[in-house]
Image: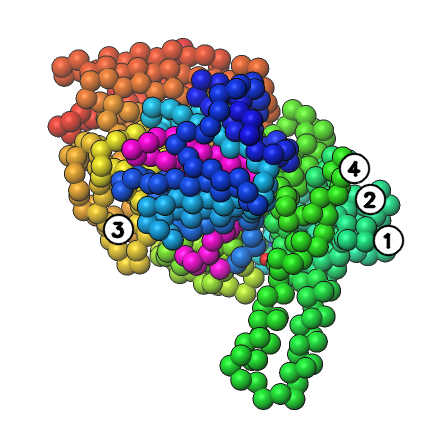
Amino acid sequence: MKVYKINDHIMKYRFGSPFETHSVVMQGELTDKGKIHRLQVQWEETLKINYKMDKEDIIWGLGESQRGMNKRGGIYEAYCSDDPRHTPDKKSLYGAHNFIIIDGLEFFGLYIDFPGKIIFDIGFTHKDLLQIEIEGKDADIYIIKGTKLYEISRNFLELIGESYVPPKWAFGYQQSRWDYLDARAVEEIAEAFEKHEIPCDAIYLDIDYMENFKDFTIDEKKFPQFKQFVKKLREKGLRLIPIIDAGVKIEAGYGVYEEGVEKGYFCIDAEGKPFVAAVWPGRVHFPDFLNPAARKWFGLKYKVLTDYGIEGFWNDMNEPAIFYTERGLQQAIHQAKRSENENLDIYSFFALKDAFINLSNHPQDYQSFYHQVEGKRINHHQVHNLYGYNMTKAAAEGLQAIDPDKRFLLFSRASYIGMHRYAGIWTGDNHSWWEHILLNLKMMPSLNLCGFLYVGADTGGFSGDTNAQMLIRWMQLSLFAPLFRNHSAMGTRKQEPFAFDEESMAIMRRMIQLRYEFIPYIYAEYMKAVFHKGLYFAPLAFAYEDKLSKRVEDQLLVGESLMITPIYQENAVGRTVWLPEEMLLCLFGPGEKLQYSVKFQGHHYIGADLDVVPVFLRKNKLFPIGSYGKNIEALDHTVLRFIGFVEDQASYHYYDDDGITYRYKEGIYDEIAIFVEKKSDDYAIHVKKKGSPKVKKLLFDLIDRRGRILEKTILLV
Ligand code: MIG
């Protein structure tokens, strides 16, 4: 083992010679200070880490995974998986995010940089034992210290580097469905948004826009004159976001396939031939995204679409998902033939059934292909978790080369820490289940902790049928998520806002309008999280250290000022909430007029009919709100309203920038520093601007502990 000091808070312990994942951006210096204190490490066939947890210890982290924000009690597997049923027993989802914080008697973060499989048994087998088994001998282990949860997360986020920043329009509402089969269908959706006056920024293109599911092609029959089509929608204020799949179709005459074979850019099998798997288009090859040349080649292919005017992409099936391989298929067919004249009993029947069910994403298939890295052949299974990450890195680098100053929308399904610097993620194929609203809520802060800030779930649920009420309640959570997208699967009930009755649609319209009204806050808080290595979504424990707050699993802090308490039970007209301190309850509903009430610390039952979003404003904080518009570009922020709950003094940093370039990196952005001080019966307000903010007038609704509202206006000159 080699020990490196990264900085005053972070130590790295290197076992063997790990595969370079590029997940961290800090190197550190070799020191001779030995042993990982606090952890028991066994280095044999595999690397094992054991830790005896205290009774009260809470374990945060693991990004995209099942169960609670507190991971204790569960067993998890870091192995990017395409599993379309996210039931609570599932050990892995699409991402591998190996960062946890141990919060209790001892207090530290633990990051395991290892590209293969890891089992995190967090008090599952034995309630007090944290047992981590790394399937290999070569790994980097980081210990991250801090005296507060926020410090540990900040130190970790510094270690892994600045998170991806999408264009500002990507904070608008986005409509998707795996069912918009041709240009006409897309146009109908666009027209419906216009007709019903529902704001929207983007419409998604799922696999059907491609010609026979071939990446970087357009089906000209279904989408004739694509360039004009993109332009036409753009004129309506909408962007089109096409999907890109990891598998490249094997088809003579298809350029991407032929070039890939010729240049040796695909993963290979044991004999050195391009590895064959089957996904959408039938047989495909997988680009070898660990090979920099292949990455560059694939990344530049996105130009085919950017040349049509496309400004955003979602990368799918990049775990990579495998429907079947020839090996598995032959085996299953063989088994079926053998069973033909048999009297199938419980064992033989299930064996037959399983032979087909287990065809997809079979472990043996992941072990039977190879990457070529710096002249070495590496079995895919050992670096499995880097695949989607590097596909997305390829895309990000390609897009950067295509248009260096332009921010593109980019998010991926599979991921590994490090990818957060290049793109966001969506949380994959969830269901229209009430339980998944809650799962979505719990996952958001865990993802932020692992660097992924641009995140969101398929609002309304991907699989299964939603109803209007579920979609509305889900929107009430998603309207705070950086990625607010409604997406659903083919064959399920339609779930665009106008697919329901008038009354429900009106509520959904209002929810989406609220999203646009909150943009000044959402965008500022997102960008500040990026710059200051903070969390956009955080568990209450990150701001309140009392015992009760640490255990709250169904409320979230959003940015520095807000706490949200979404409703996730069918037919509920309110819920119980825990207030760690006195807060201001703001009820956002159908009308313009807001209802405020001051709530004391403690448990409360809060009424919230279906058309009402309860939002809590923390004490001595401000919440900027604008007016809505038909899309992000149409927002008029010359007037902003600041709601303040001020006991003695409050400050807020409002941030904005051009929303489309990286000029903010050179310090070109707008800022308004606001400081409010309570003076017996009045308030003194100071504002200071930087840059040239569009805001000219600031309206204040200042509320004190007794619930008295004072309105003030400040002109910004
Ligand atoms: O397994 O492209 O998660 O969002 O609609 C289905 C079709 C393949 C999975 C994605 C989903 C997308 C779907 N894809």
Give the residue at mark 4.
Answer: 375
Q: Give how far across and how far down residue 614 sits, in percent.
A: 28, 42
Q: Earlier in the sequence, mark 1 or mark 3?
A: 1
Q: Secondary structure at mark 2?
A: loop
Does the magenta run of residues contain 102?
yes
Looking at the rendered structure, the secondary structure element under dot 3 is: loop
Give the amino acid type for the residue marked by disc 4 in the picture: Gly
The residue drawn where x is 68% and y is 25% is 404
Residue at 69% x, 68% y: name it.
Answer: 329
The label number, if any, that marks residue 253 in the structure image? 1
Q: Is residue 629 visible from the viewing direction of this image?
A: no
Q: Mark 4 or mark 2: name the one nearer the start of the chain.
A: 2
Q: Say which residue label 2 marks.
A: 264
In space, the residues marked 1 and 2 are separated at their CA atoms by 17 Å
Residue at image x 69%, y 71%?
331
Quarter holding the C terminus is: top left
Q: Which residue is mark 3?
A: 609
Q: Alpha carbon of mark 1 to alpha carbon of mark 4: how far?
A: 29 Å
Which residues lie in the magenta part? 85-114
Q: CA distance from mark 1 to mark 3?
A: 58 Å
User: Which of the two residues, 527 or 83, is positioned nearer the viewer here?
Assistant: 83
Query: How many angstroms separate mark 4 from mark 2 (CA)?
Result: 12 Å
SS at mark 1? loop
